[in-house]
Image: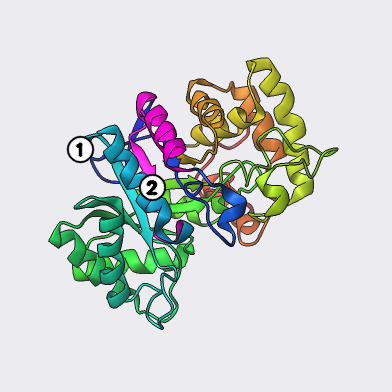
Amino acid sequence: MKYQTLGNTGLLVSRLCLGTMTFSGGSGVYQHIGSVDQAGADELVKASIDAGINFFDTADVYSGGESESTLGQSFRNLGIPRKDYVLATKVYSRMGPGRNDVGASRGHIMDAVDASLKRLQTDHIDLYQVHATDTLTPAEETLRALDDLIRQGKVRYIGVSNWQAWRIATALGISARLNLARFNTLQAYYSIAGRDLERELGPLLEEEKMGLLVWSPLAGGLLSGKFSRDNQSPEGSRRTGFDFPIVDKERAWNVIDVMRPIAEAHGCSPARIALAWLLSKPVVTSVLVGAKRLSQLQDNIAAVDITLSEEEIRQLDAVSELPPEYPGWMLATQGADRLGPVDLWGGKMASAS
């Protein structure tokens, strides 16, 4: 296993993180995602630890809190010392019927963190993430509450998930102005079939030295190897019953067509190639891998041992390239004379001559 610092911190986390949305199952959307029981969770957590994974991610909303409870019990069942794993969870989503049982207000955050600590059977959360955008709560209120949790020792680092670039930049400015703890990470959707993050979020993360934690790296199973242009609804696939995240399917089929021969050359599954492509991107800190079965997890873990050649990366980049979008194409046009061509990340590229 390889490790990387969590954003601009000294905390080392594994390049793969075990995502636990599949733990416990439940009703609603979670019945489509997985129903791993306690014994199955223990098996997955142990296999992760044995493979060198030290990073585990959950959220209070997953299966109504049962994912947190199952994960916390797994650590206890396996006797894993608290110092040997990095624990991440999230706050925002509705956790009760009351008007204030949702959001990123000070009140909900303070209630939610204590409930998560109890379910996880721990006295601190390593990475506490705001799961979504709360348009009602001022950013300063959220940041002051999170800063207090760090000062109290309940939380060590903070992050966000699914925020826009401008909103993250605003929050970082508030933290700097008020001397509050700053967001260290963004957890976001990114895959070779969905590269929208590269337009605005990627450059921001690199500039601000924030870590990127990738969710749904296989695009909800679309890149697992089960799907193809000729088999768009394989039986038993999660995505067949829950078509998420949103993906340009035609571009995805083109990507899969290119991935398959590369996977055959490496003697592995297309899923490993999709993960290896993500791990080759400097902006990526850790990739969340979720599993319902041990075999799935083992296949994903093996992706860290794959090194794609420059030509393979070129092919994958080319087939998955985003269409031009303003102002990106204008930056490239106007910047050519002064800086040389500008890539999607907003950086300088060598001029062709």
Judged from this view, the residue extending furthest toward the left is 152
Q: Position of residue 40 (x, y in %)?
A: 46, 36
Q: Tell me the crowding category of disc 1: few under 14, some 14 to 19, or many 20 or more residues within 10 angstroms, Cα based.
A: few
Q: Secondary structure at mark 1?
A: helix
Q: Position of residue 201 (x, y in %)?
A: 49, 55
Q: Amino acid at mark 2?
A: Thr
Judged from this view, the residue extending furthest toward the right is 230
Residue tagged by mark 1? Answer: 83
Q: Which mark is residue 159?
A: none
Identify the residue shown where x is 21% and y is 35%.
81
Q: Amino acid at mark 1?
A: Lys
Q: Which residues are magenta?
A: 37-62
Label 2 to label 1: alpha-carbon separation: 19 Å
Q: Tell me the crowding category of disc 2: few under 14, some 14 to 19, or many 20 or more residues within 10 angstroms, Cα based.
A: many
Identify the residue shown where x is 40% and y is 59%.
65
Q: Position of residue 183 (x, y in %)?
A: 32, 58
Q: Which mark is residue 70?
A: 2
Q: Secondary structure at mark 2?
A: helix
Q: Position of residue 292 (x, y in %)?
A: 54, 39
**Depth check, front residue: 101 or 208:** 101
Give the vertical position of 137 relative to 230 (above or below).
below
